[in-house]
Amino acid sequence: MIHEHAGASTEKVVYWTNQRSVNLYAEGLLRQVGFNYYGFGSYDKGLKVLDSLNQSWGVGSVRIVDGSGLSKENRISSRQFVQLLIAQKGQAYFESYYKSLPIAGESGTVKSLCAGQVGAGKIHAKSGSIKGIKAYSGYIETLDGQQIAFAIIANAPGLSGTTLSKKMEPLLNALVSSSAQPE
């Protein structure tokens, strides 16, 4: 051996992936999942693990073809995102995952979302966008102390991401102000 170098911890990579939407990191994390389960880090192995986990978590059948979520071939509903988020609450890594999510009005890719509004500081969410599509998913802390999982996806080819975000803010603020009701 000539040289060995330890990279950043997975926790740090996940943190920066979520805070800044670093797509290259997301692709690497998908391959790492494949390596951890199969000893070989490839897209195919990582996607196979994701399919298996989604089934075990009750998410159901989804179509994911990349690690970054940039492919228009990906297919997952808002309801499935919420089921996925609920399943994460029972995982050993949940606390570090939750802390990795940007906070509306405060940090990361959602720093301008609900800024100066009731939702600021109460929405921990990952944003996603490609031309004509804007999405947020994560957790809302309601004013009465409840935590709810949410996902909202808007498809509007003629509108900018900023415009779509502004149209979503009233709903997100209303969710923060609501009392969470069990299903």
Image (spheres, rainbow, N blue to C red):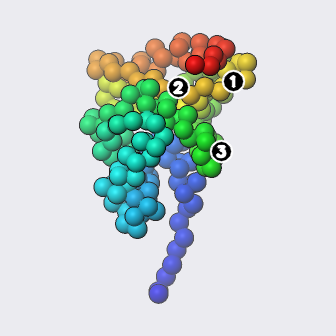
Helix, strand or loop for disc 1: loop
Which kind of residue does numbered mark 1 sit on? Gln
At label 3, counting other C-alpha atoms closer than 10 Å, the crowd grade (few under 14, some 14-19, many 20 or more) is: few
Q: Badge 2 local density, few (<14 within 10 Å), some, or many (20+)?
A: many
Rendered image: mark on residue 146: 1
For the residues marked 2 and 3, what is the alpha-carbon distance in whole angstroms?
17 Å
Q: Secondary structure at mark 3?
A: helix
Res. 74 mark? none
Q: Amino acid at mark 2?
A: Phe
Q: Which residue is mark 2?
A: 150
Give the spatial CA distance, label 2 vs label 1: 13 Å
Could one spot residue 135 in this view of the protein? no
Distance CA(mark 1)–CA(mark 3): 16 Å
Image spot of residue 114 (x, y percent)? 58, 21
Q: Secondary structure at mark 2?
A: strand
Q: Residue at x 37, y 66 (%)?
A: 40
